[in-house]
Image: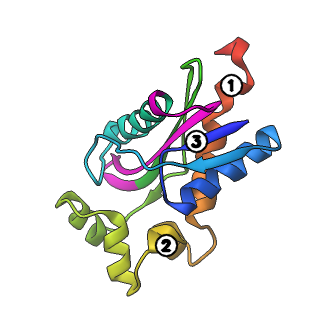
């Protein structure tokens, strides 16, 4: 089974590989950079569009069994801002499954910068004083003091996005 992820970020690729391996066993997972077609720091439903756009572009360009778009964004619920990732899994027939990672709260000082157009990865690099946080533990790693990392967070969303493919008769 060949799975193509719309990203060059090793954290996203590994999350998809781990999730698909848990569900289907032996899989080949490759990353391919594609544009999301949304803003660099998506908000709300825009995050879903970005994930879907990535999966659609991959399906048009590549040969595989599954095409996966992963998009991180923020959403406002009950007057609080949360970070989350949306996963769109599309098979070669065009069937789609969506899932999300767990949501986690963001502090106001971070949200203000995001709403001004900065990306969370850049803000976290500044807060932590190191480069490339989004390619390793992510913001979730910082805010949970290492109890969870970005790969684990995204893996949950991938598994949830596979539900319609595991129970096709119900979807």
Secondary element at tag 1? helix
- Whether the magenta-drawn stretch holds residue 75 is answered as yes
Label 2 or label 3, whichever lies nearer to me, is 3
Q: Which residue is mark 1?
A: 165
Whole-number angstrom distance, CA of label 2 to CA of label 1: 33 Å
Q: Is 99 in the magenta?
A: no
- Image position of 5 with respect to 153: above or below: above
Q: Is residue 101 left or right of residue 51?
A: right
Q: Which quadrant is home to the N terminus?
A: top right
In the rendered image, residue 81, in percent from the top left (x then y), is placed at 34, 55
Q: Which of the labelled discs sits on residue 143, or is there none?
A: 2
Is 105 or 140 nearer to us in this picture?
140
Figure disc tally: 3
Residue under numbered circle 3: 4
Mark 2 crowdedness (10 Å alpha carbons): few <14, some 14-19, many ≥20: some
Position of 95 with respect to 76 (left or right) is right
Question: Where does residue 86 sit, x and y in percent of width and height?
Answer: 47, 43
Residue at left offset 27%, top offset 72%: 109
User: Is 113 in front, or is 72?
Assistant: 72
Q: Nearer the viewer, mark 1 or mark 3?
A: 3
Residue placed farthest to the top in the image?
Answer: 169
Question: As displayed, is residue 166 above or below residue 45?
Answer: above
Q: Is residue 39 above or below residue 67?
A: below
Q: Nearer the viewer, residue 110 or 125?
A: 125
**Which of the two discs, 2 and 3, labels the residue nearer the N terminus?**
3
> What separation in Å lies between label 1 and label 3 (alpha carbons)?
16 Å
- Tell me the chief SS of the magenta region: strand
Mark 2 or 1, nearer chain start: 2
């Amino acid at each position: 089974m060949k799975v193509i992820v719309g990203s060059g970020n090793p954290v996203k690729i590994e999350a998809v590989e781990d999730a698909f391996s848990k569900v289907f066993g032996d899989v080949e997972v490759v990353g391919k950079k594609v544009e999301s077609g949304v803003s660099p720091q998506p908000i709300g439903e825009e995050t879903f569009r970005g994930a879907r756009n990535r999966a659609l572009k991959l399906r048009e360009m590549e040969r595989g069994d599954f095409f996966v778009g992963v998009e991180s964004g923020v959403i406002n619920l009950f007057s609080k801002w949360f970070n989350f990732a949306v996963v769109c899994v599309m098979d070669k027939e065009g069937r789609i499954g969506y899932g999300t990672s767990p949501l986690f709260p963001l502090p106001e000082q971070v949200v203000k910068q995001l709403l001004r157009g900065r990306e969370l990865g850049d803000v976290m690099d500044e807060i932590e004083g190191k480069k490339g946080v989004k390619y390793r533990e992510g913001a979730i790693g910082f805010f949970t003091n290492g109890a969870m990392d970005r790969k684990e967070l995204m893996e949950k969303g991938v598994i949830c996005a596979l539900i319609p493919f595991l129970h096709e008769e119900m979807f």
